[in-house]
Amino acid sequence: MNSKPVELTQAEWAIIKAVWPREPCTAPDIQEALLTETRWTYSTVRTLMDRMVAKGLLTAGKLRHLTLYRSAVSRAEAQRGELLYALKHAFDGALTPMVQCLLDSGDLDARELAELEQLIKARRKQRGR
């Protein structure tokens, strides 16, 4: 994973979510996939994707006359960046209030709570080494 967290705009999230299951893909592929949701024209999608290449979020390669795009960040990297952004901006970097907010706002069932407990136990073991 990148050491610097990935921060995506709302438009970049729409693009990369469409790219992940289709890669390698073209701008027309993504424009078609997002058309009903966004109503973006081909030129809008192409511009966004080219900017994402410049930012290191996508890669682009030529195959004859086609430009094929691939993601340069994983779903986990993007999710981590989004979470760290929220932690930094909404909770001033304080993890406990963020987790408390998630616990209070979510309808967690017993299985999910048990999974969270296991994650915490595993982290404690890892730190104890």
Image (cartoon, grey):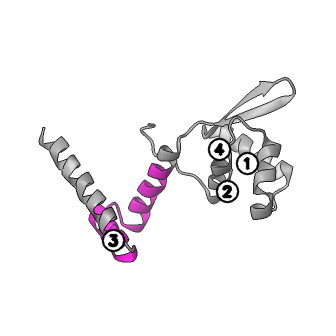
Up-down: is 42 above or below 57? below
Q: Which mark is residue 24?
A: none
Q: Earlier in the sequence, mark 2 or mark 4?
A: 2
Q: Nearer the viewer, residue 124 or 92?
A: 124
Mark 3, residue position:
103
Q: Earlier in the sequence, mark 4 or mark 1?
A: 4
- In front: label 2 or label 3: 3
Q: What residue is at 36 percent from the left and 67 percent from the top?
A: 91
Image location (x, y in percent) of residue 7: 53, 51
Amino acid at the residue labelled 3: Leu
Amino acid at the residue labelled 4: Pro
Which stretch did the figure color magenta? 79-106
User: Residues at badges 2 and 1 in contact (C-beta under 8 Å)?
Assistant: yes
Q: What residue is at 46 percent from the left and 46 percent from the top?
A: 5
Q: What residue is at 64 percent from the left and 48 percent from the top?
A: 16
Q: Earlier in the sequence, mark 1 or mark 3?
A: 1
Mark 4, residue position:
21
Amino acid at the residue labelled 1: Leu
Considering the numbered disc 4 on the image, is that residue within a helix, a strand or a loop?
Answer: loop
Is residue 92 covered in magenta?
A: yes
- In front: label 2 or label 4: 4
Q: CA distance from mark 1 to mark 3?
A: 36 Å
Dot 4 crowding, Cα within 10 Å, few <14, some 14–19, many 20+: few
Amino acid at the residue labelled 2: Ala
